[in-house]
Amino acid sequence: MSSLLTEPARRIAALEAAAAAPGGEGYILAALEDAAPSVRDRAIRLAARYVEPAVLGELVADGENAVRRNAGLSALERQGPYAVPHLVAMLGRDDAELVLFALQSLARIGYASAGPSILPLLQHPEPNVAQAAIEAVGKLRVQEAVPALCGLLGRDLWIQLAAISALAEIGHPDAVGPLMAFVPDSVLAEPAVQALRRIAAPESLEPLLPLLIAVRERALRDSLLLAVGVVIDLHPDPTALLGRLEHDLVVDGGNLVAYLEQLLTAYGVEDGGEADSLLRAAATLVAAAGIAQLQPTLLTRLGTDGTAQWIEGLLSRFPERLSPRLAALLAHSDAEVRCGALRVGSFGPDDLSAVATHLGDPQLPVRTAACLALGRMGIDSAAPLLLERLRRGEPPEQAAAAQGLARLSVEALVELESCLDRDMAEPVVIEALAVLARRPVPGLESRVLRLTESPSAAIRLAALRAAARVAGTRSEGVLLRALADRHQPIQAEALELLVRRGGDRSVATLVALLGTADSFRFHVIRALGHCRAEAAATRLRDLYPECGPHEQFQIVWSLLRISPPWLSQFLLLRLGEKDLDMRRAAAQGLSEVAGVEHLAALLRLGEDADWDIRNSAARGLGRLGTAEARTALLTLVRDVESVVAATARTALEQAYRDPASSAA
């Protein structure tokens, strides 16, 4: 096998063999200068694991050897919080270039605990260091840096740009005023508006709206619109401010309206990127401000764009902006506008006749939307209209009518009985049963249970879902019998319905089914897990040796959900198995249930040769929160595998307030 290895591969193998041995540090440091990139990359990973930050820091301080310096920086960054104390100490060195590298590494590592140490460097006489400090407090989101950053907005251009970007990263509303000073008459106007968009403070909406009308330069206007759109999304109630915009549009001469219309008609969400963002921002402004000229355009888009359901939610957020013009929109000559108005309009009992009129519209989408609108009204007097569409409408109308009927009272749904007759078309029966699955009607329970024996598999399936909502032993018996249905999807559905229903009888039946050694047993094991059936735990444990790998894995996951008292002991036994996948599953399970008493086991897993098992160990150690666990995590944070290191970092962040101080 070794003869097949390339020369770099041989060197990597030798390096890995020597790395953890006494004197291995020397091999690693030498390999950081290897001619092969693959060897250098592996050496960096091993250096992060086995070489202390102080040693790596000396490599960074070596200005004569760029290769070693870059490798040292990469290894320090891979060490994450373990290296933070040393990097913070480097900030006090006299070598400006070394300080610059330390700042960049701290920013990339991303631990805010270093923030106070960086603040004095914002005023560093070396511009590159000052700029790196600005960028670092931005990436670390150091709130205390906001006043100093605002003060730097009066410095030279590059410092200004860096400060604007940092303020955007931090997102503090105190930056709104200083940033607005750049808009619109400055070369920094566009970056400032982009920062305001990221900050998205409610305070910025009032000064931004007039500028959106006044500014005609397209790039800046786009940035302003994007900022306004984000602020409206996050503003709890922008209605008062947006009402002023409607007045301002009168003196605008239609320029802003034309601009917004162009965005609403030119772009599609499939365009992605900035085009999608501009479309959404324009729609947000039109919906929130109630711009009458553009409401039909927005409703048309809702009707024609299958991916534009977000517009429906947007218009529904501001119903008071649409209501005054709803009657005119419902009478619009364009069917897409009528359809959109029905989908988003807010209707009350007095609007029943106006909405019902559209059940006779020549366009199917309009009739469908009218069914949905009647359902949203939630009044029983709409029931005969919806039942008529359920019986005689086209499939989309039937589905919409069923959805609407499910919102009505039980008393209004008694008339569904006629939709369950034998001579009724199958789609009507299925939709009627779908209503009863959402809203059970006691008077129709017997009809529903009989339909679970229908010759049609589709009707049996729909009836089974409705029967699951019926209380009592009869319906439970129906579900249990359906486990033997000749139609496999019905078997699976019955199992899921029993899981949702719960109950001792269902669990007892499922446990009995564990005796069947066929493909259905896997689903039964899974169902018992979803039921969290404590009564099944011992039986599942005893069944484990008899099963194949597929079922064994499911037993492990089901027992994790049931969580019997002996679960951790069961998982520890699985860790001793030869199969790597089972050991991985057991390690992952132990990471979810481990207590302090399992510290020794997790420490062993943290040294396992398999990266996935070490990854599970990192998660489990993070749950313990002890000093020993923290020490182990600070080792795993330097793991040669990036996934393990990232998991350990996350565990440190969640379990300990200041992982960097613990490293010190």
Image (cartoon, rainbow, N blue to C red):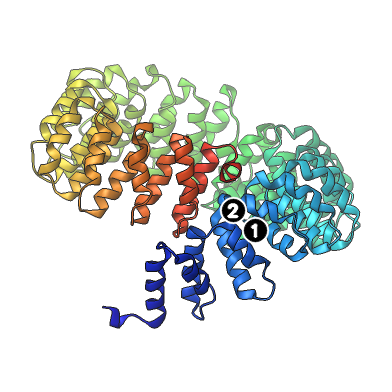
**Residue 288 in the image: x percent, y percent?**
71, 39
Q: Which amino acid does label 2 sit on?
A: Ala
Which secondary structure, mark 1?
helix
Q: Is 221 above or below relative to 629?
A: below
Residue situated furthest front in the rendering: 22
Q: At x 58% / y 48%, what residue is drawn?
A: 302
Look at 78% across and 48% down and name the residue there: 119
* Label 2 or label 1, whichever comes before in sequence order: 2
Horizontal side, residue 30 vs residue 609: left or right:
right
Task: Tell me if I can see residue 335 in this picture.
Answer: yes
- The foreground one among 489 and 69 is 69
Q: What is the quadrant of residue 413 in the picture? A: top left
Question: Residue 408: percent from the left, percent from the top?
Answer: 43, 23
Q: Which residue is drawn at 39% across and 82% down?
A: 7
Q: Which amino acid does label 1 sit on?
A: Ser
**Residues tagged 2 and 1 counted as in contact (Cβ below 8 A):** yes
Q: What residue is drawn where x is 8% and y is 43%? A: 517
The x, y position of residue 586, in whole percent, is 28, 44
- Mark 2 vs mark 1: give the one in front: 2
Q: Is residue 488 above or below residue 219?
A: above
Inter-mark Cα distance, 2 to 1 = 10 Å
Category of crowding for the residue at label 2, using alpha-carbon neighbours closer than 10 angstroms: few (below 14), some (14–19), many (at least 20): many
Quadrant showing the C terminus: top right
